[in-house]
Image: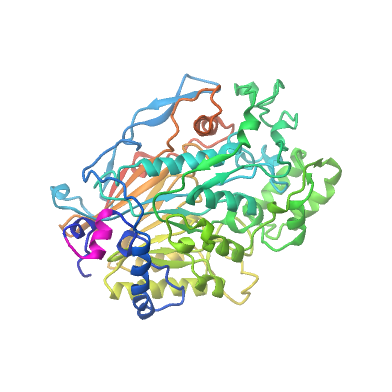
Amino acid sequence: MPRIRSVAAAATNPDRRAFLAATGAVGLSAGVGLALRPEADAHAAAASASDDRAAAVALTNREAPAAPLKPYTRGTTLASVAAPRGGSGYRRLGDGPAWKRVVRGDLAAAKAGREKRRTALASFVQFTDLHIVDVQHPLRYEYLRAQTASAWRPQEALSVAGAVSLVERVNALRGAPVTGTPLHFVMTTGDNTDNNSKTELDWFLKVMSGGRVTPNSGDPRRYEGVQNSGLKLYWQPDAALRDADKQRGFPRLDGFLAAAIREVNSPGLKLPWYSTVGNHDALPGGCYAPGDSFFADFATGGRKLMTLDERTGKAIWDNVRSGGDPKGADWKAMLKAQAKKMRSVTPDENRAPFTPLEYLKAHLDPAHTGPGPVGHGYSQANVDNRTQYYVFRIADDVIGISLDTTDPGGHYEGSLGAAQLKWLDRTLKENAKNGSYAIVFSHHTSKTMRNLRKDPARPGEARHGGKEVLDLLGRHRNVLAWVNGHSHRNRITPHAYGDGGSFWEISTASHIDFPQLARVIELVDNKDGTISLFTTLIESAAPHATDFADLSQTGLAALYRELSFNAPGSRTDLTGTSGDRNTELVLRKG
């Protein structure tokens, strides 16, 4: 494997390309390379390089963050982490003890003195499972709350404010926490939206690239959803009703719902950002095959189901978990049978589901370019070929590969089609010849790629699960990491393949469920035959402590976190172990 040229070393090189990389300005070396066509070969990629550099120069007016070029902890979980105060019931949050960094030598020994030898190669931020939610959407299945805590969460009306605060945190970082070098980009690894809704897609793109968002649909003057329904099943924040959540200590907050649907202003990321698709971005409800006109009509219509008897709800949810209703036939039948129990809401055409093609075109819309790149990884080639996977340049000798692990046949678990798997294999081989290491991004984890249901548009194409993807990655010694989400849990897993390759699978918690985290990942050459991947978790910029009287944008973002901690039925293992959080992951150089 040829020597990797590092960003730190490039700072001493007077040529234009090195200058762009060293200053953190947008350029090929700074993670803003042209997203390569899924079917392009290495020669086509090289031929596009001149255009790529031209685009980089055009975007260099972005002010780069000041880089201290030394380790720091401020604004990260190495300094402090939100933690509960008090013993029982509804618990308030405050500043808690930091999470220390853990060195993991599962795949290679960590050699003494490496901190003095190492040079920075690349650094970026991973967002995952933002779940920007239109909480008034008619297709939401809050009525399954008794069956699964993910059906409805007390905090989700504040998802936009929470996501904007995460953007603010990244913008405030001084650089990469270990090396201090400029951060190159942000990658969001799917479930950017919650209901596959055009309202949510618009809000997500404005949160990421900048703009004003009014997180309200239907009636522009008021909220119409389960939280002012008078139903005890849900937290009724503005009402005196002693609902189930208030019985657990949740507060009464006059003005909460009016504040929740008030306009939010996002500064947008100051860094380039890329996008990966998740099952909630592609499938109605995150689990049903798209394309049924009934669901599209229901999404934009004026009726919403808010309650369901427990026996019927259990049958629906058990079917969802097993993948027994991939097209939503039973769900549709249930909705039709419950028509008389539905409540009237204001219809809204903007709640319509978006197609994969509309998802691509929305990313390519110049209104959402922000700091770039145009399309945020997706290109006209993706539009022409109806694909949602691509390769891009992270650094001079490191590529990023974004996969589409959603299954159009239905169900929330994922897989890869044969054509994409072959493309992945070919892309890794070609870039290994060019001396490039690879970091792979996807929504699903290796353990949640067990859905081999055929794609209705490609009935003759085989689907491949996580074990096959792991085996393929293990055959390529240039793979350093597979970065993903979906599980809403921090977990870092080593994968070793004997004489083949070894790599780390880095799975990060969501930003909808507590602990609401994102992850900074830094790649360094230790100059001793090893490479280290540093992972550092970050929270949003909102203060840990909340003030129930503060319903400002910042106050709502803080409340978003505290409500998520207290959400009834939420899992307590999503934080992971110390070895899944702030780490140094050591690898042998391929």
Say if the magenta span includes residue 20: yes
**In the figure, is residue 311 to the left or right of 457?**
right
- In the rendered image, residue 522, in percent from the top left (x then y), is placed at 30, 51
- Front residue of 180/206: it is 206
Q: Quadrant of residue 237?
A: top right
Q: Quadrant of residue 52?
A: bottom left
In the rendered image, the quadrant that contains the C terminus is bottom left
Residue 337 to residue 46: above or below: above
| Point 51% across, 34% down: residue | 557
Is residue 39 visible to us here? Answer: yes
Is residue 497 visible to us here? Answer: no
Overall secondary structure of the magenta stretch? helix
| Point 72% across, 28% down: residue | 232
- In the rendered image, residue 372, in percent from the top left (x then y), is placed at 43, 59
What range is drawn magenta here? 13-23
**In the figure, is residue 327 to the left or right of 516?**
right
Q: Quadrant of residue 43?
A: bottom left
- In the rendered image, residue 589, in percent from the top left (x then y), is placed at 23, 62
In the rendered image, the quadrant that contains the N terminus is bottom left
Count of numbered tags: 0
- Front residue of 138/423: it is 138
Say if the magenta span includes residue 394: no
- Front residue of 61/381: it is 61
- In the rendered image, residue 355, in percent from the top left (x then y), is placed at 63, 63
**In the figure, is residue 542 to the left or right of 57?**
right
Residue 56 to residue 118: above or below: below
| Point 36% across, 40% down: residue | 172
Residue 263 to residue 408: above or below: above
